[in-house]
Image (cartoon, helix red, strand yellow):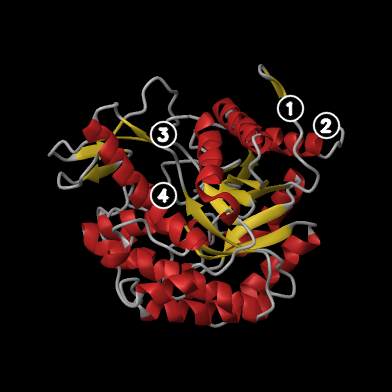
Amino acid sequence: MATETDTGAMPRFPDGFLWGVSTSAHQIEGAAELRGPSVWDVFTATPGRVKDGSTAAVACDHYHRYREDVALLAGLGVDAYRFSVSWPRVDSPGGLGFYDRLVDEVCAAGVRPVPTLFHWDLPAGLDWRQRDTASRFAEYVSRVADRLGDRVGKWITLNEPAEHTLLGHALGVHAPGGRLLFDALPVAHHQLLAHGLAVRALRASGAADIGIANSHGPTWPASEAAADREAAEFYDVLLNRMFADPVLTGRYPEGIGELMPGDVHADLEVIAEPLDWYGVNYYAPTRVGAPRGTEIEFGGVTLPAELPFSVVAVEGRPLTDFGWPVVPEGLTELLTGFRDRYGDRLPPVVITENGCSYEGLDDRDRITYLDGHVRALHRALAAGVDVRGYFVWSLLDNFEWAEGYARRFGLVHVDFATLERTPKASYGWYRDLIRAQRGTPVR
């Protein structure tokens, strides 16, 4: 399969650019009986929480099939594998042993292991509304780093605290199912504090090359009307700046800090511990307008009437099977905007997630999506953004949270009845892209 499309040959990225693929523990591991329960186990046990009524008790059974999945990584030829470590599994007998075996297998395949230390599967009984959870997280991080740090050279503290706060605690559509609206703000602060404490714990263990994976996207006003622009600015603060500003500048956006609990000034010194790189998960921009005073269905989520904004469709764009607009140039806009906003405070950037949901083994729409976004990333690099890597979401079709098994993001198809893995056309496309970038002949 050639790496050329209708828009011409793929431009070359710098030598040393990191090509990778991502997964998360709860979405693929299964073997739920061999770990403690997480908030997601409690959530999915409640009827009506997951659209198809499924759970992740088996998922892709990666726990038992990790060697098969690492062989898929080796065949893909990626430089790095981003996976997550399950805190509930580490808290269970033998849990760290699984990650020992996984990391050894990944390293033996010539791939760099890049663990994410929290990807939403909080142990049941803990609560991000409580400040102590941040300290408990740092203790857990130290245990993982002490065990795996001799082989792991690149770390991610948290995945998408914005989504975990909004969907899990403000709107209740993800675990743990809280419907707190703006009373969920302490959840955001305590996750950010946990990030800073984790950076310190990793440094104390001798670790280097540390980042965070925050989700970001451009916010577009629905019109030039003042009310729409004001609503879009508020949304941008809430979903982008509230999670980037504290990490990169040591400050919350104006008006946010006083809403947070505890000694915020002291906490911000911890939250802003210097990073080696900044991870960005990008999927699409969001078009935002003034509040309508009614509930709005958007992307499978019901937005309450009392929110001070509304989310409207990005028109004139193709949609993924999830209904998300395909806007590659939004990635260029996002990264150049971050460069302009944060200047020297922005460390090198790694795209820690980018991908799409499409059905079928001959997934040409996914190839078109990924091709467009890789080109958009190169345009950001050419514009002066220091971009060091790109990770596709995801290696495998998996348990897609509240959507259950209805959405397929994988480069590899998983038959959830037999657990058979079958590489899709996009797997071959990405393999050949990586080979071409290295100057290796494409078969």
Give left or right: position of 76 versus 370: right
Q: Which of marks 4 and 2 is nearer the N terminus?
A: 4
- Mark 4 and mark 2: Cα distance apart in space: 39 Å
- Mark 3 and mark 2: Cα distance apart in space: 32 Å
Given this view, does label 4 or label 1 mark the residue nearer the observer? 4
Q: What numbered label is drawn on residue 369? A: none
Label 2, secondary structure: give it: loop
Pointer 4: what residue?
240
Give the class, few, some or many, for how many residues have Cα within 10 Å of label 1's Cα (few <14, many ≥20).
Answer: some
Q: Is mark 2 in CB contact (under 8 Å) with mark 1?
A: yes
Label 3, secondary structure: give it: loop
- Mark 1 and mark 3: Cα distance apart in space: 25 Å
Pointer 1: what residue?
3
Q: In which quarter of the image is the C terminus?
A: top right
Q: Is mark 4 in CB contact (under 8 Å) with mark 3?
A: no
Q: What numbered label is drawn on residue 324? A: 3
Q: Which amino acid does label 2 sit on?
A: Val
Given this view, does label 3 or label 2 mark the residue nearer the observer? 3
Pointer 2: what residue?
442
Q: Which amino acid does label 3 sit on?
A: Trp
